[in-house]
Image (cartoon, coloured by chain):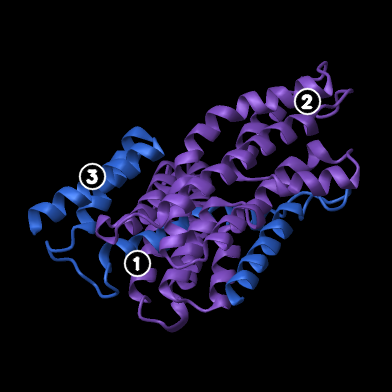
Chain colours: A purple, B blue
Amino acid sequence: MEGLSARAAFAAGVRDELPVVAGVVPFGMIYGALAVAAGMPPALAQAASAIVFAGSAQFLTAQLVGNGAPAAVIVASAAVVNLRHLLYSASVAPYLRPLRTLWRWGLAYLLTDEAYAVAITRFRAQPTRLPALRRHWYLLGAGLTLWAGWQASTAVGVLFGARVPESWGLDFALPLTFIALTVPTIRHRTEVAAAAAAGTVAVAAAGMPLKLGLLLGTVAGIAAGVFTRRYSASRMRSARETT
Amino acid sequence: MTLWLTVLAIGAATYGLRVAFLARSTAGPLPVLLGETLRFVPVAVLSAIIFPALVQPGGVLDLSTGNARLPAGLLAALDAWRTRNALATVGAGMAALWALQAVLR
């Protein structure tokens, strides 16, 4: 990529992101339909795709708006869901550090799960300090492609959503979406522990006011994951020392 | 109006998280414990949403056979684990829900 012109790097980003967009479009449509069904004004459901531009947080917002959760709880929950973006930010920072402020601040807006995943794969394929950096053009191409796909698919969902009868149980697509996102990330027993603890506590605390069960479950899940990881790491160390 | 402010606040928080390490060109690496904690955030949050949606569909615990969402969700989880295809998972779960509801009715 280092030898590429800005335009070619941008085009490469667009090209690499397109298959991902094909997978994201159905979810944009489901989001749009669900958000309207949950009682969000159509204009707001659409605007959220540009203002927030983070699928899982938008799904969560739609669900909590439908449940009548207070604004502070919705904001806190969505912020917690998006904490993972800190990881992305830290992870791409070494590659984008030489850029001017405007580029860094602009690209941060496009740092979604899907654009990050595509871009970091490309970035890592080559050393950091090569000359003629075009990485920012690549990320811009990937990010804008995803952005356009997300806005357009939201619009289709918003238009279509008002016409879906309630008996279809479309709201169930929401937990199903989350299942589809979560299950493939569970590869290790630490993640199983995090999922089990989070789910159990959330169920046990479901009666709590202000929908606080979600946050409580999340904290329990993170604690269980970190604890299991530390515990198995120290056990592995002591096993190595005794043998 | 409150809803609009809510969405604006979520957008600001999300952008803040995304720009955190890009805002200045001198930002250091992520502290180890923070990185370790963040790793578990997605699986924890999403599980905290999924479990109640499957076992407490009406707001109260329902493990009876009348609750079609639990078996449909489990089937979807199995599908997600096997196919790793998000759309197939949602499709399988919805199909299972409709089939079970038709049988139970």
Q: Where residue B47 sits in the image (x, y, percent)?
A: 41, 58
Please state which of the two labelled residues, at mark 3 or mark 2, is closer to the viewer. 3
Q: Residue at x 64, y 35 (%)?
A: A145
Q: Which residue bears the numbered disc 3? A: B95
Residue B22 horizontal side relative to residue A119, left or right: right
Q: Is residue A106 visible?
A: yes
Judging from the image, mark 1 belongs to the subunit labelled A
Q: Quarter of the image holding residue A116?
A: top right
Q: Quarter of the image holding residue A115?
A: top right
Q: How many marks?
A: 3
Residue type beneath disc 1? Thr
Q: Residue farthest to the top? A: A3
Near mark 1 (Cα within 10 A), the count class, few <14, some 14-19 or many ≥20, is: some
Under circle 2, the secondary element is: loop
Residue A132 horizontal side relative to residue B72, left or right: right
Q: What's the mark number on residue A127?
A: 2
Q: Where residue B98 sits in the image (x, y, percent)?
A: 20, 50
Q: Residue at x 46, y 69 (%)?
A: A64
Q: CA distance from mark 3 to mark 2?
A: 47 Å
Q: Work out whether residue A140 or residue A129 is closer to the camera in this orientation and state it.
A: A140
Among numbered discs 1 and 2, the one appearing first in the sequence: 2
Tell me if residue A116 comes above or below residue A128 in the rendering. below
